[in-house]
Amino acid sequence: MVAVGVLATAALIALQVGGATPAAVQAAFGVLVTLAVAVTFAGARARAAERAIWPIVGATLAFNALCEVGAGWSQIVGGGPWGAISVAAGVMVVPLAIASLLLLLRERVGRLRAVASLDGLTLALVVQTLIALALLGPVEHALADRGFTASITLLYPLADLLVVGVVGAAAAQHGWRPDSWSWLLLGLIAMTAGDAAQVGDVVRATGPGGAANVAWLAGSWLIAAGAWARVPPKLAAVDPRNWVPIASSVLALALLIVTATRSADHPLALALAAAALAAVLARFALTLRANARMLRDARREAMTDALTGLPNRRRLTLDLEARITRRGGTTCGLALYDLNGFKDYNDTYGHAAGDALLITLSEKLQAAVDGRGVAYRMGGDEFCVLVECANEEPAAVASRAAFALDLGTQGFEVNAAHGLVLLPSEADNASDALRLADMRMYEDKERRRMGPRRQATRALMQALAERDAGLHEHLEGVQMLATEVALRLGLDPAEVERVRLGALLHDVGKIAIPDSILHKPGPLSEAEWTLMHRHTLIGQRILERAPALADVAELVRSSHERFDGGGYPDGLAGAAIPIGARIIAVCDAYDAMVSTRSYRAALRGEDALAELRRCAGVQFDAGVVERFVAAVRERDYPADTESTGGSRVAASNHVAPASPVPNTSPEVAPK
């Protein structure tokens, strides 16, 4: 391709040197440029992605060649309108060339950064100012009496530099590229040289052609070679060089000072120098804005845990110091959490699974304290919550957050030990608060080590899961609801744990109930109900065999008592029923009402809440019902959607359906 272009250019030079007539030279020039355009179009078809771009480049070359041939022919025939028309039309070559180059840059490079574009524009304007200052004054005086055509010719070299500036912008963003970009750049430089040679021809009043034709033809063939050259792969963006705007700003300021003192002689140079300086100022403004954004992002990243998106230890320290030094504020709490069982899970399933589990737990923790505090990740398997409570005790929020970090997955049980410090009464600076919370957390960790209580609970829950998976999920749902209500009632942490275990194990006696009764598809007979009512006593006996769970056995026995004394097995009434059993009764009834039963359709959440309120003071403790309804409404449980199973508190704090559990709950309204 390059060899053909060299031969074509050499042929044109030979015609000019050999004394051919101007008309013959212009005709040969037109034919050779037409061939270059044809080669450009052919090369465009080799690339599917650029097939619509290179024809615009070729059309620009063809239009430019027609204008030059028209201008030359006007001089050959000695006048006529063709010269002025061709020269004026030639100005349209510049926007066509810029448009085609921008399309090519977008395809190969992507979107140009504003900073890179301004760098390319600044360089072009500075060079234009130099040309205008050095050449346009003398040339303009020499052509003062030449008319419109000569004046328009002066603008060609300046306009060419704008086209070169587009390529300069790409270079500022991605560095100079070899292959096709090199040929394209060389072609643009050759055409700029041709326009400069044309200005010299006009000043000297020589005939058309000469060096200008040779440069234009060489530029056309170099661009044609670029259409066929290999496109280099996209490179990662590089930062623009700082010397470009610095050098450009110094030159632009110097040129502006020089031209301002002689503005009458160089009005165009003055305007170009001012435009160059404005581009530099715009570039620096963009740089300052980008630096400010980078600093802001860096600060945010420095205060955020990369894995979970929670604020990190550094942010906690700043927030804690600000909260302690605040005067006149309400009491707040600092709760520190450390995960138990996470290391074994992480070692078994790998770091990817461990990271996924940490993300899940962080979402649950954030949802549990939403509106009451801020959750942080301290690093590793440690979390923290800064509790701001005006309407709820910090201990209740801290306990709720601990239960949010309690998760059983893939045979592993992950839970959290925690320590709570009240501020500012127990600590007056961040380091003391963290040290005290850490000490209390490890005290809790020692108490929560896997002992007989937890081992017995896990064994019984596994037995229930093997007997009936639906029953297991029902108990999990009741446990989550009961824990929430116990926290809202302000029970101490030990009693909250007792209620949680009681809710989890309140149907453990159903292990001894025959499947024919437990899974009967319809109402039970009187004899079957009598046998079913024994499951609380069976559950009590099972738990009393495990001394670590003996205190829970009382709650299991009384979990189906009624507030009016009409329940079983003892007919207890009112305050004689343990508070934990009263909580379990409400949560169990709600879960049963929103569960699908083979003989009764599930109630919607709102209808189930209405049924609880209707039975408050008769079947259920009114105070417990009030706390339960408030908990459901405040945590935005779906109250108007039909459930297909037992309710469960999910990480999003919504009630999700569980599997149906036939005949697992007491009556929910008086018969």
Image (cartoon, rainbow, N blue to C red):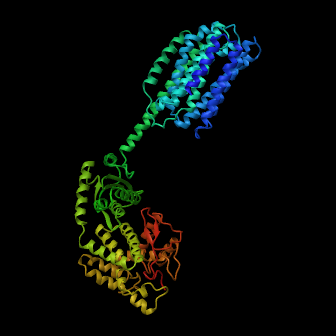
Comparing 542 with 152, the one in front is 152
Instruction: Name the residue at 38% across, 44% down.
Output: 301
Instruction: Name the residue at 75% across, 18% down.
Output: 82
On screen, residue 172 versus residue 81, left or right, reads left
Q: Residue furthest bottom?
A: 527
On screen, residue 603 versus residue 411, left or right, reads right
Quarter residue 133 falls in: top right
- The number of numbered discs placed on residues in the rendered structure image is 0
Above or below, 54 relative to 440: above
Instruction: Name the residue at 29% across, 84% down.
Output: 541
Q: Residue furthest right?
A: 80
Above or below, 201 relative to 185: above
Above or below, 8 relative to 652: above
Quarter residue 260 falls in: top right
Comparing 288 with 227, the one in front is 227
User: Is residue 285 visible in this depiction of the protein?
Assistant: no
Above or below, 652 relative to 129: below
How far across and how far down the image is residue 300, in percent?
39, 43
Q: Quadrant of the N terminus?
A: top right
Comparing 458 with 182, the one in front is 182
Quarter residue 454 falls in: bottom left
Comparing 413 with 218, the one in front is 218
How far across and how far down the image is residue 243, in percent?
43, 24
How far across and how far down the image is residue 409, in percent?
36, 66
How far across and how far down the image is residue 102, in percent?
58, 32
User: Is residue 229 visible in this depiction of the protein?
Assistant: yes
Instruction: Name the residue at 58% across, 40% down.
Output: 49
